[in-house]
Structures are given as structure tokens and as C-alpha cells.
Amino acid sequence: MQRDEVINHIRNDPNNPISSKKVLETLLIKKETNWNEFLQRVNLFGLDINSLIIGLKAKEREMKLEGNHIDYTKWNNLQRDEANHPVFQVMDRFLGYEALISRTHEFFQKSLIYYNNRPDLMSVENGGVLNKEDNVVCWEGQQGGLEGLRQKGWSVVNLLVIRRESMNRNTKVSLLHQGDNQVICAKFKLQKSRTDEERREAIAGIVKENKNIMDAVERGTTKLRLIINKDETLQSADYLVYGKVPIFRGSIRSLEAKRWSSVTNDQLPTLANTMSSISSYALTVSHFSTSPLNSIVHYNYLGNLARNLLEIHNPAVKAQISTKIQHSEWLKSPEYKALV
């Protein structure tokens, strides 16, 4: 929503949350955007004051049991224009602009930022939005960033820092990045040894070299004023997690419960799309499992459960299936169940 629309909502309807506009509604009502003109205007002048507004929503609580390699504390809020501007300028030149991307940090510094669920705690004075009480639910501008905005650019900056620090060592390093979760895979070759003592010394040398790499990375990120969250940082010789998918000794491990939990009914479920969804997830689970047996068992159980539920009441026909077909006894036949 635009700034004037939010101000109007606070004045006229403060007891209801400030809703965001639907993309489809905006597409149908607003005039089509000329993207070349829009990007050039942002490149030269930035956004107008009415568009400089950011609405915040409550974040879903996350449950984390283990650290996920390198994780940063308040990664978005600690991003600063001074640290990212030079790299963003290079991105601009690559695309033929002068300040389209590098200017985007101004959006955080100049925007009205508000929490959409509590307009009752906001007031409008002289065209600005203020907090009514001591509870802070809105403010004008901030130096740091926010989650979901500009994160790809920040990831590139972090990637360059880690790459620069790791290049100073005589070790092959591979990097995986996903926002503030970053995986550094250092590859070492164990020296040949004749005794157990020599092998232990070689392993100790690898551990020391790996520590030197991690210390260099930490020094580099500190220069960007970022803080590594030690409680959620993990080092392991044979285990990594990327995109919440665990990989152990090069083998991708399947999170069966997580994948099966996505099998849900649509708003208007039919036998075809429900069974298609179940079979797709069964194949996905089996592809990442060491054995297909669990997938076969779960497919049989969930498939028959979905079939029985839809036979009891099918929303598409608004009735029990047996009352809508001529030969209801066919529903009990093994041929029908096999075809389903």
C-alpha cells in the first residue's frame, strides 16, 4: 500500500489490521507499468515519498535444533550502505545503469516502516505517522535492512568476502549460500602416512588449516560489521545442510516426515489430483532414500486413506460416491482399487 493509503486507514479504520493489496487486484486496476521508464526514473531520482513505505508482519516462530554452518546474528538489520555500495555499483555498471541497484539502500533510510497489525497504536500528525504510546510500532527510516528485501545482493557481498579470505590459503574451497546461512566446504587430501602417529599429525594439520580458514572468514565478515552467531554455527567433517536438506558423507538424506506433511487436500479435491499428489511425494521420498520400502508402505496407507475419505464424501459431487454411481459394488472390487 502507498503511504497516503496507510495514513487514510489509520485515520478511518484503526481497529482493523492494515491489509496488503492483492497482486491480481493491482494488476487489474492499475495502469500497466512501462518498466524501462520506471527503472530509469529510479536510477536517476529514486522513489517518490508516497512509495517509500514498508509494512512488517509477524514472523513465524522457527524451531532449530542444530546450527546450520555459518549463521549471522541480525544479518539483515546489520547490513550497511557503506559496506555494500561498492559491489552494488559494479552490478549497476554491468546492467548499464548508474545508481539503480546501489540506490536501493535509500529505501530503508527514507521509508516509513510500520507493523501492520496495530494501527490502533499509531496516530497521524502533520502528515506523518507517530506512535501513540511507548510501544514502538512505526518509525521513519533505518540504517539497516529488512528480511526479504535486497537479500540476494547481500549474499553476493558475503560470498565475495568469504571467497577473498579463502583464496589466501592453499586449499580448494566450495561455497553454498542461502541468505544468512552459508556453507563453506574445504577439501583436503590426507597425506600418506606410515604409522598411526603420522596419520594423527596429518589430521591435526588439516584441523589447523581449516581453523585458519574459518578465522580468516570471521575477520573478513567483521570488517562488514556483521556478527557470526556462534550458537548456530556448525563445523563437521562429513555432514552439511543446505536448503534444510541434510547431506551425510555425500549422500542426500530424505526428510520423509517433512515431505509427506505436504500431502494436503485442495480447496476442491478430486480423486485424480489427490492421488497424483500422493504418488508424486512417494516418488520424491523414494528418490532420496536408501530403500523404497518406506515409500511403498506410506503410499499404500495414504492412498487408501484418501480414497476412503473421498468415497465417504466427495466435495466435487457434494455427496457420497456410492449414491452417485449405478454399480456401487464396483467400489469394493480389487480392480477399481488397483486402477486408483
Image (cartoon, rainbow, N blue to C red):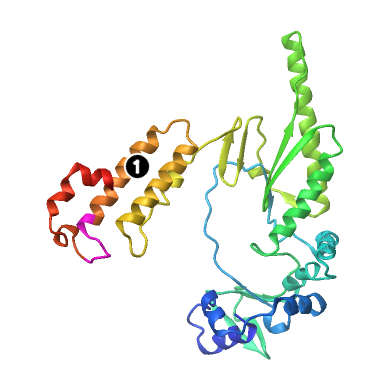
Q: Which one is in front, 38 or 2?
A: 38
Q: Is residue 320 magenta?
A: no
- Residue 120, above or below 108: below
Residue depicted at 83% across the width and 59% down the height: 87
66 to 146, vertically: above or below:
above
Residue span colored magenta:
311-318
Q: In this rendered view, identify the residue nearer to me: 248 or 209.
A: 248
| Residue 329 as seen in the image, left or right of residue 242 | left
Which secondary structure lies at badge 1? helix
The quarter holding residue 239 reads top right
Residue 201, percent from left and from top: 77, 17
Q: Which residue bears the numbered disc 1?
A: 299
Residue 1 at x, y = what percent?
59, 80
Please tell me in which quadrant of the rendered image residue 83 appears: bottom right
Frontmost residue, 307 versus 262: 307
Query: Which residue sits at x=19%, y=59%?
Result: 321
Q: Amino acid at mark 1?
A: Tyr
